[in-house]
Amino acid sequence: MTIRSMTGFGRAKGSLGEEWTAEVIARSVNHRFLDVTVKVRENEIDLEPVLRRVFSRHVARGKVEVALRLKRSTPAPTVIAIDEGLLEALLARFALLAEHYPVSGRLEARDLLTIPQIFSVETSGNGFTPDDLAALEAIAREAALALVAMRETEGALVSADLTERIEFLEKRLHRLSLRRGEIAGKALETLRERLRPLLSEPGLDPGRLEQEAALAVDRSDVAEELQRLEGHLEQFASLLSSSDEPVGKKLDFLAQEILRELNTLGSKGRDLQMIREVLEMKSETEKIREQVQNLE
């Protein structure tokens, strides 16, 4: 599966039978989970499940906003309804008032138009046929594929950048691994120098001091951290090169683990060059974390 970013845009347009023209527009940004929002008008609510189903099928993670723009290709047939019962009651009431009060004249059509309850104009043919729904699904699929294509294009750029940064960390890790024995030897020698003044103190066993110094150096050894770092970097590179599912969350977790091991290395480090190397690696790992948070 190609590495995908969570940022993208897709658009598609087509016809729904002979009456409608539909345009589907989709935008996506970063999000921890999949969140699909579909914007349709009230009389198009039957189309919302179709759009949601299509985009949920093609996108695994991110906040996706889908908008539907639906226009009629032909004028909609209209029906004018008249409430004849209300009209008859109104006329009868007017005639009754004319008998008892000085009310003269007659009601004109323009007078009746001022009473909104008498007339209603309705548009017929608002229902969507199964063929319309199938056509909309095809348009939505085209828009979803365009969105995915843009996410894959950006994902490829992010993947290339991450690959370079992982290679940088691997080179630095290799240098630290080669110097592990040297670093441990320097640490032991430094500790011996600090303990040397104590050797002349009465009651202190030189052998015991040497043993404690060796134990202190052993506790500061970074072999395990270096080994775990190597494993994390190998797994990270493997996920970037080949994966059958979205890897954004896995890469984010690995980046956190890499940073945790580097923090441990920094806390154990007494060698100035090692500390500098670790600081550079931590800075690079922070950049990696920023990048992977944009991956699906």
Image (cartoon, rainbow, N blue to C red):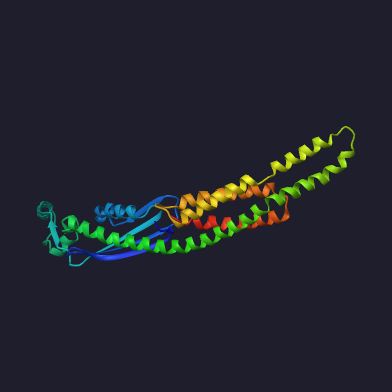
Q: How many marks?
A: 0
Q: Quadrant of residue 108?
A: bottom left
Q: Which quadrant: the N terminus?
A: bottom left
Q: Tell me: 6 left or right of 75.
A: right
Q: What x and y, as percent, mark residue 39? A: 33, 57
Q: Tell me: 170 left or right of 16.
A: right
- Decide which of 126, 100 is in the foreground and name it: 126
Q: What x and y, as percent, mark residue 90? A: 13, 53
Q: What x and y, as percent, mark residue 191? A: 79, 45
Residue occupying image coordinates x 70% and y 44%: 220
Q: Which quadrant: the C terminus?
A: bottom left
Q: Quadrant of residue 221?
A: top right
Q: Residue furthest top?
A: 203
Residue occupying image coordinates x 48% and y 60%: 159
Q: What x and y, as percent, mark residue 180? A: 68, 50
Residue 103 vertical position relative to residue 226 in the rendered view, above or below: below
